[in-house]
Image: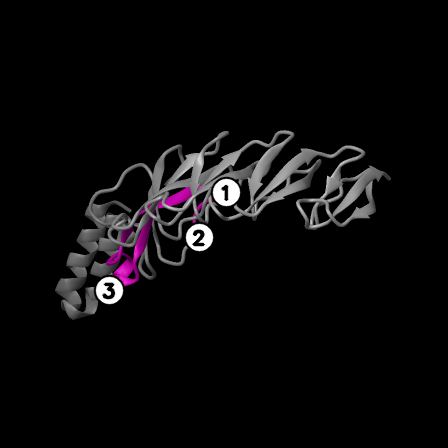
């Protein structure tokens, strides 16, 4: 039904029944013309002044796959708060609590960002990138260095693709096919470091080292792994 015909019916009802009897009809017409709904929070309700190619969503609503939250309006959705969602891209700033899309890491922090709740910069992972404490480690990468003063004082960690003989920080994942063969208590800016090697027969592996498929641990040597003890790697 056209807007003209709807308003005509409302006017007829006002004449016949009085203004109070058609208040609901007026509300319905307004909802249709403004693109809203009669009940519940709408996209228009969530949207504050100024918006781009993404969409505003009420607090508690799921973030669309591949998207991140880049702005926050505490007055949106009738005071419940709303978040602006848009597709992730290299270098985008996101609000605290935003999901981290697969293949991305967190590389910087701004305390006053996102209207005071804090913001984090998301970047596509690459060999040698520095990330903030708490950033996910993309599968296939290891953590190879630590800077306590990095990322605005919360600490930062360097991510690298593994190679035979790389030193990694305590807490770094071990990529499939690698074993841990050495330890430095003072490595990684005091966090401790572990030497990673591609698994092969004859290596002495440290306590906690994975044993890849096709291998087994055999003879124990108390002095191995810088005094922590080590097991000789052999074929299964």
Check contact, mark 2 vs mark 3: CB within 8 A. Answer: no
| Coordinates of residue 55 in the picture (x, y in percent) | 34, 44
Q: Mark 3 sits on what residue?
A: 24
Q: Mark 2 sits on what residue?
A: 62
In terms of secondary structure, where does tag 3 sit? helix
Residue 226 occupies quadrant? top right
Q: CA distance from mark 2 to mark 3?
A: 32 Å
**For discs 2 and 3, the disc positioned in front in the rendered view:** 2
Q: Quadrant of the C terminus?
A: top right
Tally the numbered discs: 3
Q: Nearer the viewer, residue 136 or 97?
A: 136
| Coordinates of residue 152 in the picture (x, y in percent) | 32, 45
| Coordinates of residue 198 in the picture (x, y in percent) | 70, 32
Q: Which residues are magenta?
A: 63-84
The residue shown at (76%, 43%) is: 211
Residue closest to the far right: 236
Identify the mark at residue 188; answer none if there is no mark. 1
In terms of secondary structure, where does tag 2 sit? loop
Q: Determine crowd level at label 3: few under 14, some 14-19, many 20+ residues with C-alpha closer than 10 A.
A: few
Left/right placement of residue 169 relative to residue 16 reads: right
Identify the mark at residue 67; answer none if there is no mark. none
């Amino acid at each position: 039904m056209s807007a003209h015909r709807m308003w005509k019916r409302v006017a007829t009802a006002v004449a016949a029944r009085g203004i109070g009897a058609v208040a609901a009809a007026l509300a319905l017409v307004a909802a249709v013309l403004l693109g809203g709904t009669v009940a519940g929070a709408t996209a228009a309700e969530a949207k504050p002044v100024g918006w781009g190619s993404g969409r505003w969503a009420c607090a508690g609503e799921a973030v669309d796959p591949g998207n991140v939250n880049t702005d926050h309006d505490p007055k949106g959705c009738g005071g419940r708060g709303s978040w602006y969602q848009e597709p992730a891209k290299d270098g985008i700033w996101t609000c605290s609590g935003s999901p981290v899309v697969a293949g991305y890491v967190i590389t910087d922090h701004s305390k006053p960002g996102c209207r005071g709740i804090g913001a984090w910069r998301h970047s596509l992972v690459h060999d040698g990138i520095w990330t903030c404490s708490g950033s996910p480690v993309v599968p296939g990468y290891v953590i190879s260095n630590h800077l306590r003063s990095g990322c605005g004082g919360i600490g930062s960690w360097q991510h690298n693709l593994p190679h035979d003989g790389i030193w990694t920080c305590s807490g770094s994942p071990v990529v499939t096919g690698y074993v841990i063969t050495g330890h430095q208590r003072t490595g990684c800016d005091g966090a401790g470091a572990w030497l990673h090697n591609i698994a092969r027969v004859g290596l002495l592996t440290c306590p906690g080292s994975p044993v890849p498929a096709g291998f087994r641990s055999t003879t124990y040597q108390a002095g191995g792994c810088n005094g922590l003890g080590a097991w000789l790697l052999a074929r299964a």
